[in-house]
Image: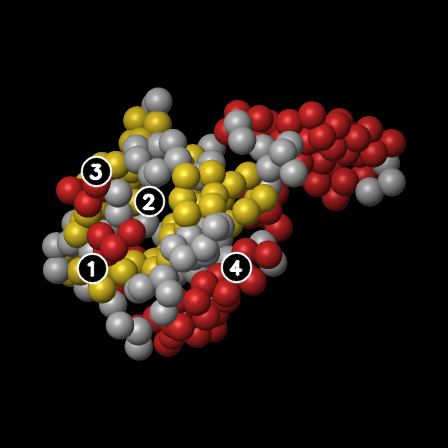
Amino acid sequence: MMLPIPDVLDKEGVARIRALIDAGAWADGNATSGPQSALAKRNEQLPEDSAAAKEAGRLVLEALGRSALFIAAALPLKIFPPLFNRYQGGEAFGTHIDNAIRIHRGSEFRVRTDLSATLFLEDPDAYDGGELVVEDNVGASAVKLPAGHLLLYPASSLHRVEPVTRGARVASFFWIQSMVRDDGQRTILFDLDRSIQAIATDRGQDDAEVIRLTGVYHNLLRRWADA
């Protein structure tokens, strides 16, 4: 399931993070690449152990915790500390697939990458190119979202960032280990959750069918979740 999640950050939230990271010391983005990705990747990245990256990452995590849609879709168990990248002057990231396991540098914290996320931190009219292209079994989707919006997609997907030919594309990116490993099962739970919320809005939380369906949701989650 590929899902745009709007307004993870409001304008003030985007501005606060940009003030932190724009003043940071950017470095070659291949500092966190595997050998295959390094062949395809040309961008800049904020060092993950920098004070700016840590504080901006904390703000991103706080915002994710306030997003009911993100929580319902991702069912997060662990989130890799958010990273920050920038593309400009023709920089791009060719087609690749994310590593299955990500280990936070200098720690024992590791994440199985069930989901990948890109949180856009620049409005699309400020740069040309830079689309995030995600491939699945029905083709490729090119995505370029407003600042503060997030794209969530399976980390098993082939994807790329198109060359940026004007301006700069700035984003946060990270990975999620979900309580539910299987993408199909997560999609079923997400669809069921949205239907329950819609019925509850119409009938009320104490409606007998809402209660029954809520029980079905939690029994499926209990069956499928690793928590």
Q: Choose the circle earlier in sequence order: 2 or 4.
A: 4
Residue 28: which disc? 1
Please give the label number shown on residue 61: 4
Residue, disc 3? 36
Structural distance between the alpha carbons of marks 2 and 4: 22 Å
For the residue labelled by badge 4, is the local secondary structure a helix, a strand or a loop?
A: helix
Q: Secondary structure under badge 1?
A: strand
Q: Name the mark on residue 44.
A: none
| Mark 3 closeness class: few <14, some 14–19, many ≥20 residues within 10 Å | few
Residue displayed at 82% across by 42% down: 205
Instruction: Tell me what residue is drawn at x 65 percent, y 38 percent.
Output: 227
How much space separates mark 3 and mark 1, taking CA atoms? 16 Å
Badge 2 is on which residue?
143
Pick whichever, 153 or 36, lies toward us.
Answer: 36
Q: CA distance from mark 4 to mark 3?
A: 29 Å
Q: CA distance from mark 1 to mark 4?
A: 24 Å
* Residue at x 25% of width, y 55% of height: 31
Taking 3 as reference, is 123 left or right? left
Dot 1, how many residues are within 10 Å of its Cα: few (below 14), some (14-19), or many (20+)? Answer: some
Mark toward the start of the polypeptide (3 vs 1): 1
Q: In terms of sequence position, does the residue under pointer 1 or pointer 4 come before the other?
A: 1
**Residue 153 seen in the figure:** no
- Could one spot residue 175 in this view of the protein? yes
Image depth: mark 4 or mark 3 in front: 3
Image side of residue 13 versus residue 190, left or right: left
Q: CB under 8 Å between callouts 4 and 3?
A: no
The kind of secondary structure element at disc 3 is: helix
Task: Assess disc 2: are there few (<14), some (14-19) or many (≥20) residues with their C-alpha within 10 Å of its C-alpha.
Answer: few
Q: Nearer the viewer, mark 2 or mark 3?
A: 3
Label 2 close to label 4 by CB (< 8 Å):
no
